[in-house]
Amino acid sequence: MDMKKMMKQAQKMQLEAARAQEEITQMEFEATTGGGMVKVVAMGDMSIKSVSIDPEAVDPEDVEMLEDMVMAAVNEALRSATEATNQRMNAVMGGMKIPGLM
């Protein structure tokens, strides 16, 4: 493969990766805990869009359990976003690791 063809292929891959990354940032990842009592929605850019807590989950005698449910839902939503990002980028890059793109 000549250098010109390799450079063209690398540029194409970079554009596809940028497009995929933009798509991912717009995606939403939802996670719930406590049988749906706590719901967290994370965006593909790893920001938290919303947190919903059922009033029944609020027990002044057990704030720690609510904190644990919120933390678990946030972690699951972010894990889902990270997993989707990795899968999408691996599909675009064909498993190649290029510094600055992944």
Image: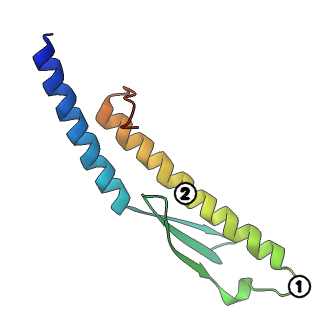
State the scheme by which the image is colored: rainbow
Question: Left or right: where does residue 51 sit relative to residue 17?
Answer: right
Question: In percent of the image, x 69 and y 65: which residue is there?
Answer: 71
Residue drawn at (65%, 78%) of the image: 37
Label 1 residue SS: loop
Residue extending farthest top: 1
The residue carrying pointer 1 sits among few (fewer than 14), some (14 to 19) or many (20 or more) residues within 10 Å by Cα, namely: few
Which residue was labeled with disc 2?
78
Mark 2 surroundings: few (<14), some (14-19) or many (≥20) residues within 10 A:
many
User: Mark 1 highlights which residue?
Assistant: 61
Residue drawn at the location 37% of the way across and 58% of the way down: 25
Q: Inspect the image, locate mark 1, and give the three-letter code of the amino acid beneath it.
A: Glu
Q: Residue 9, image x and y in percent?
A: 17, 26
Cβ–Cβ under 8 Å for marks 2 and 1: no
Q: Which quarter of the figure has residue 1?
A: top left
Q: Which mark is residue 36?
A: none
Q: Which element is circle 2 on?
A: helix
